[in-house]
Image (cartoon, helix red, strand yellow):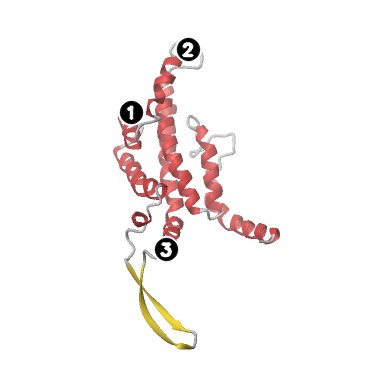
Amino acid sequence: MNKEIYKNILNEKFESNFSNVEKYFEFETVPTDLKLQTLNTLYSLIYQNLQNLIFDNYIASITITSHLLEKFCKLSIVKYDIIGENLFSNEYNNKIESAYRYDSKDLNETIKQLHKYKLISQGELKILLKLKNEMRNAFSHADSLKITKDYPNKIKAFHANFNDIEKLKVVELNTKTTFIKNEQVELEAQKKAFSYFKQLYKIIVNVDYKLRKAKL
């Protein structure tokens, strides 16, 4: 592809999509309701994700959001466990070592630990478990049948003979046919990528606020 053509395509996507995600770019020094403070090391992943959304890279966005989900849960536990300690306190090293105990645990356990710490509500617990099962697991494992579970097994299409283009024949196609299944997965990613991120980000903001209050 010609370089200038590709640049124009990307510019068009930027102009079309940036306003949708603009409020999540928190470059201002003055805190806003969306600005993370205790969990600010998540911004690297968040900004990578926003770039994917701007340029319509929906499956890449879902992949990063899934990584963000797990990173957020583990980081929140670490931050909670070292509340009251600083880098130079006597107990810091012991607590920081213990805080990483969830790094190798199943994500279900990590999410439930956030609830035990009262960092998330019962409703947020259900949302995170649902996102983990329906979005993170399905897309991370490329489980196309799970991703497209609400789609029919057959679709109707028209078959034509180029020698007699006016005679169209209605046929049924199996949606497990690879090019059809691929299009369905892409469509689901397009429909759900931004929503997945927004639901998770709202919970991250709430947990960040609770961690800040716990330090006071």
Res 151 visible: yes
Amino acid type indicated by mark 2: Ser
Of circles 3 and 1, the one toward us is: 3
* Crowd tier of the residue under label 1, counting other residues whose Cα lies within 10 Å: few below 14, some 14–19, many 20 or above: few
The image shows residue 70 at horizontal and vertical percentages of 41, 37
* Secondary structure beneath label 2: loop
The image shows residue 158 at horizontal and vertical percentages of 41, 79
Q: Is residue 50 above or below residue 37?
A: below
Q: Which residue does the numbered mark 2 point to in the structure image?
A: 89
The tag earlier along the polypeptide, 3 or 1, is: 1
Real-space Cα separation, disc 2 to disc 1, in angstroms: 23 Å
Could you say which is closer to the camera, residue 121 or residue 92? 92
Q: Is residue 153 above or below residue 79?
A: below
Contact (Cβ within 8 Å) of mark 2 with mark 1: no
Amino acid type indicated by mark 3: Thr
Could you say which is closer to the camera, residue 88 or residue 207? 88
Which mark identifies residue 117? 1
* Secondary structure beneath label 1: loop
Q: Which residue does the numbered mark 3 point to in the structure image?
A: 178
